Amino acid sequence: MQNGDTLPRTALVTGGSRGIGRAICLRLAQEGLAICVNYAGNADAAEETAHLCAEKGVEAFALQGDVSTAAGCTALVEAALARLGRLDVLVNNAGITRDGLILRQSESDFDAVLDTNLKGAFFCAKAAARAMLRQRYGRIINISSIVGLRGNAGQASYAASKAGLLGLTKSLAKELASRPITVNAVAPGFIATAMTDAISPAARTATLAAIPAGRPGQPGEVADAVAFFARPESAYITGQVLCVDGGMAI
């Protein structure tokens, strides 16, 4: 790592309060990074995540921020920088769904998904890249989805946003590689979270049947992939998409 100072490595994780986001925060804290846990509305869950990270011996704090707007993303990154002193790792994990068949989906629902999932990642990366360019070091990791590679009936907006993240990842990787800043993506498959727990038993059975590994993934398995991309030792890996999906993309 080329920072020339004694500050610990730092990370901002958007949507870090629960599920996969919480697992990512905890895994990066285990790696010794100071953690900024971004959240949209659930302050209690975010504070709990920050507390669990702090128990691993690192600085950790929760920070509210709306990543669906350019101003919100810029303010979030600036606030994280003010507290952390530098920003080494950005994980664009915040995401929402507004599922429905295309004939029933409104333009406002479609826009809401893209604003948070895709434009939020763009604006956060843009703000973070300024700091990373000054540091001449950075890791940007976008949480996409296997749905962005395969599509899924009833999830046109979600699939479009997650597919867009893959193009964003590869383009930013080419722009920033010489700095040296890496940009990679992790594409989870069917992961056991509160979101997937809410699907119907029939849909769950059908989904599991499509997974060669025969089981759901765990949030910690996604977090392990993020930790790999976040390490200084991953400096020669950029523009890549790592599917954590039990073989669904095969």
Image (spheres, helix red, strand yellow):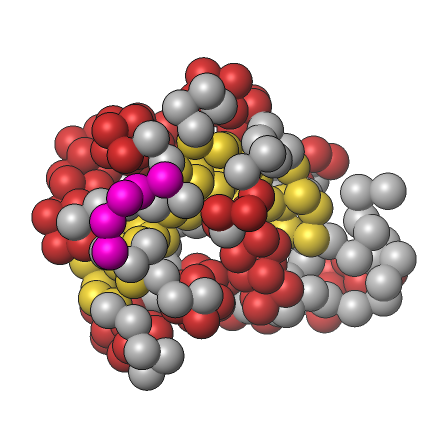
Which quadrant would residue 114 be assigned to in this image?
top left
Left or right: residue 95 versus residue 246 is left
- Residue 242 image point, x, y percent: 67, 43
Q: Residue shown at 48%/42% (left/top)?
A: 141
Which residue sits at x=27%, y=44%?
4
State yes or no: residue 213 in magenta: no
Residue 194 point in image, percent of width and height: 51, 69
Let me know if residue 5 is in the magenta part. Answer: yes
Residue nearer the viewer, 200 or 180: 180
Residue that sits furthest to the bottom in the current view: 55
Is 96 drawn above or below residue 190 in the view shown?
A: above
Count of residue discs: 0
- Would you identify the image quadrant in which residue 59 lies? bottom left
The answer, for residue 161, to whether it is visible in the render is: no
Spot occupied by residue 117 in the image (x, y as percentages of width and height): 42, 38
Q: Which residue is painted at 54% across and 61% down in the image?
A: 223
Q: In terms of depth relative to the viewer, which is nearer, 245 or 69? A: 245
Question: In the image shown, does 133 or 250 lie closer to the viewer?
Answer: 133
* Magenta-drawn segment: 2-6
Residue 119: x and y in percent read 36, 29
From this view, report whether residue 145 is shown above or below residue 131.
below
The answer to whether any part of residue 6 appears in the image is: yes
141 left or right of 179? right
Identify the residue at horizontal 40%, vertical 24% (top origin). 179
Image quarter (top left, top right, bottom left or bottom right) of the N terminus: top left
Magenta residues, dominant SS class? loop
Image quadrant containing the C terminus: top right
Residue 200 against residue 185 in the figure, above or below: below
